[in-house]
């Protein structure tokens, strides 16, 4: 295999940096969800890369669990965004000030 | 040395990750996010784990990206095309990103990870199924329950009828 472990780890670090940039700069709730997705994918890439180079099946199993939990997280996050949008008529997180209801 | 497929995949993945956050329209942004998720699936194929790649395509590109697209369609038209961000924070965010990348990158380039290579055969996907059904079976059942609970909770939250009448701010 011509690719080394360090290449995959560097791609994963780049994705993590982009995700943290999105989380810190953007105020759009849906864009922040995009950033969270990018960070989760960077973590999954790391898991599978290390599992390939050990090699052991545990990393791939953990990556499968992680993908499934991320799916649940996106469903709940999107429905929270929909509820907040119906309450405030906006998706700017600076407008979501009250915890009521 | 990396091969051409790796280079092409990393350009696609990182480029469309930046595009997903920077495109003005949320619809094009979510399509660029699909590109990122598909690129990660390509990396999984390069890492000889086709089962995870298929799972990634089915779950992320197939369902999560489509769910995000449908949510974007529910939002008002002018909000889709409006860029909501702090201009003052933008340079600080870019600086934070560069510092993080350079710091973590230099730590990892200096560490012993650089010399790790392997010639061993890849893990067979039958081993993953065996793991799931023997050692990890309680976690599998718990994950199924969590998924069912999360999807039910999401439906209950999104279908609330009382939000619009009483608690709307303006």
Image (cartoon, coloured by chain):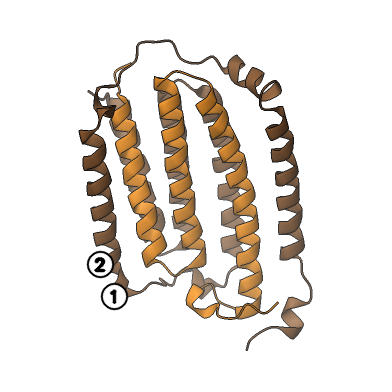
Q: Are marks 1 and 2 on the same chain?
A: yes
Mark 2, secondary structure of its residue: helix
Q: Which is more toward the observer, B102 or B45? A: B102
Q: Say if mark 1 contacts mark 2, CB within 8 Å.
A: yes
Quarter of the image where the N terminus of chain B is located:
top left
Chain of the residue on which disc 1 is drawn? B
Q: Residue at x 37, y 41 (%)?
A: B13
Q: Which is more toward the observer, B44 or B28? A: B44
Q: Is residue A70 left or right of residue B19?
A: right
Residue A82 in the image: x percent, y percent?
Answer: 64, 67
- Disc 2 crowd, CA 10 A, few/some/many (<14, 14-19, 20+): few
In this structure image, what is the colour of chain B? brown
In this structure image, what is the colour of chain A? orange
Q: Residue at x 60, y 21 (%)?
A: B128
Chain of the residue on which disc 2 is drawn? B
Q: Residue at x 47, y 33 (%)?
A: B41
Q: Residue at x 50, y 16 (%)?
A: B123
- The residue that disc 1 covers is B88
Residue B170, located in which quarter of the rendered image? bottom right
Residue A100 in the image: x percent, y percent?
Answer: 67, 79
Residue A35: numbered disc: none
- The residue that disc 2 covers is B91
**On screen, B103 above or below A95?**
above
Mark 1, secondary structure of its residue: helix
């Amino acid at each position: 295999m011509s690719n080394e472990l360090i290449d995959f780890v560097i791609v994963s670090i780049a994705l993590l940096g982009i995700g943290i940039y999105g989380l810190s700069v953007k105020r759009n709730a849906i864009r922040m969800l995009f950033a969270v997705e990018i960070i989760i994918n960077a973590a999954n890439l790391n898991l599978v890369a290390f599992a390939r180079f050990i090699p052991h099946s545990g990393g791939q199993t953990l990556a499968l669990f992680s993908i499934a939990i991320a799916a649940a997280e996106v469903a709940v996050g999107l429905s929270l965004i929909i509820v907040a949008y119906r309450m405030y008529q906006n998706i700017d997180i600076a407008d979501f000030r009250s915890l009521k209801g | 040395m990396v091969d051409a497929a790796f280079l092409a995949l990393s350009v696609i993945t990182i480029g469309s990750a930046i595009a997903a956050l920077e495109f003005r329209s949320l619809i094009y942004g979510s399509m660029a996010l699909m590109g990122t998720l598909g690129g990660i699936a390509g990396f999984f194929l390069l890492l000889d784990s086709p089962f995870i790649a298929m799972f990634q395509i089915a779950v992320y590109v197939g369902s999560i990206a489509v769910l995000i697209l449908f949510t974007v369609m529910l939002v008002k038209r002018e909000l889709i095309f409006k860029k909501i961000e702090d201009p003052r924070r933008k340079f600080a965010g870019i600086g934070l990103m560069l510092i993080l990348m350079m710091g973590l990158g230099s730590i990892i380039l200096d560490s012993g990870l650089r010399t790790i290579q392997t010639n061993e055969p890849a893990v067979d996907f039958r081993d993953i199924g065996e793991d799931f059904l023997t050692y990890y079976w309680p976690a599998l059942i718990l994950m199924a329950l969590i998924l069912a609970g999360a999807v039910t909770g999401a439906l209950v939250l999104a279908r609330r009828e009382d939000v619009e009448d009483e608690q709307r701010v303006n």
